[in-house]
Image (cartoon, rainbow, N blue to C red):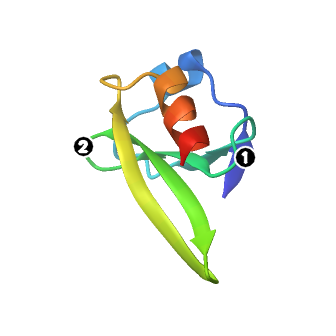
């Protein structure tokens, strides 16, 4: 999986359905995915040796700053 500092400009250029999965270097555990119909923010955390992934919101309804704030709180 690629890692990079996510930006608004990059998210606006992503196309749904492209299959991209990118981890944010600024907030550990935050990922963005370009799924079939949408671009979604996920949080990925390990607990008791098991990796969990949870959807936290969809772009553009959720901003990048909101996604980072939620990822930091979890």
| Percent coordinates x, y for residue 21 in the rendering | 54, 51
Q: Residue furthest top?
A: 9
Q: Is residue 25 above or below residue 35?
A: above
Look at the image and tell me whether residue 46 can be seen: yes
- Residue drawn where x is 59% and y is 63% of the image: 45
Q: Is residue 47 above or below residue 35?
A: below
Q: Earlier in the sequence, mark 2 or mark 1?
A: 1
20 sits left or right of 28 in the view: left
Q: Are marks 2 and 1 in contact (CB under 8 Å)?
A: no
Q: Which residue is mark 2?
A: 37
| Percent coordinates x, y for residue 61 in the rendering | 30, 24
User: Residue 20 has which mark?
Assistant: none
27 sits left or right of 30 in the view: right
Q: Residues within 10 Å of mark 1 (few under 14, many from 20)?
A: few
Front residue of this view, candidates 55 and 34: 55
- Give the structural element (helix, strand or loop) at label 2: loop
40 sits left or right of 11 in the view: left
Q: Which residue is mark 1?
A: 3
Front residue of this view, candidates 21 and 59: 59
Look at the image and tell me whether residue 13 can be seen: no
- Give the structural element (helix, strand or loop) at label 1: strand
| Percent coordinates x, y for residue 25 in the rendering | 75, 40
């Amino acid at each position: 999986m690629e890692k990079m500092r996510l930006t608004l400009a990059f998210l606006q250029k992503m196309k749904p359905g492209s299959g991209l999965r990118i981890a944010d270097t600024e907030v550990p555990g935050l990922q963005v995915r370009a799924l079939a119909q949408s671009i979604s923010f996920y949080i990925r955390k390990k607990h008791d040796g098991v990796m969990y992934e949870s959807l936290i919101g969809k772009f553009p309804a959720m901003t990048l700053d909101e996604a980072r704030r939620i990822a930091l709180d979890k």
